[in-house]
Image: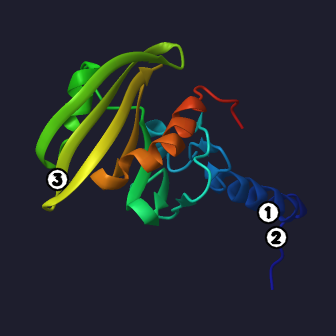
Amino acid sequence: MRRLPAVLARSIPIVASMLLLSSCRGWQGDEYLRHRVPATRAAREASFGFGLPGEPWRAVRKVDGVQVAWVHDGIAGVIDLHAQCDEQGDSSLEQYTDHLRIDWTAWEVVSQTAERLVDRAALRTVVDAQLDGVPRRNEFVVVKKSGCLFDLQYSARPDGFEAGRAGFARVVAGFRFPTEAR
């Protein structure tokens, strides 16, 4: 039986530790840490921070395509945060917001206001729409910074929308980018 050279044998635990640490990315507390591997995923993601919505919101993890999300069962509410750092082009914040209407019908803008977030222009839009025929009220905050596009979304039944807005406001108020690289 052949043995590994001593140098190789000593490096196996180091390499294994590096792989383990590099894979421990994603949502951690009040931050989303971009993945480092695979390179195609790393190029699309950003590390960012956010406020926490508090009770009775509960975190939803390990859902394909979702970076950070919470649900509020009492109002059928969802808060979802997403960052994309490539292939978003150079559209206006209005155009990016309009792009979020995919899968929605009966889209009616209730209000739209310009504001500042992470020292950049942002657009907050409240929309009444339907998803699979079910009425929803939605609030979107869209901001671009350093080549990344962030959309912060809140959706709930129209009769419960106001009850969940404070949680969404806490998430948006705590939004940070860039964050300390780890």
SS assignment at label 1: helix
Q: Can residue 133 be seen in this view?
A: yes
Q: Which amino acid does label 3 sit on?
A: Gln
Which numbered dot is residue 12? 1
Q: Mark 2 points at which residue?
A: 4
Q: Is residue 103 visible?
A: no
Inter-mark Cα distance, 3 to 1? 54 Å
Q: What residue type is labelled 1?
A: Ile
SS assignment at label 3: strand
Q: Which amino acid does label 2 sit on?
A: Leu
* Sequence order check, earlier mark of 1 and 2: 2
Which residue is the extreme one toward the left? 106
Inter-mark Cα distance, 3 to 2? 62 Å
Which residue is the extreme one toward the bottom? 1
Q: Which percent across, then down, holds residue 47? A: 58, 36
Please say if 177 is above or below 138: above
Q: Tell whether 139 sits left or right of 27.
A: left
Q: Which of 43 and 51 is in front in this view?
A: 51
Inter-mark Cα distance, 1 to 2? 10 Å
Which numbered dot is residue 130? 3
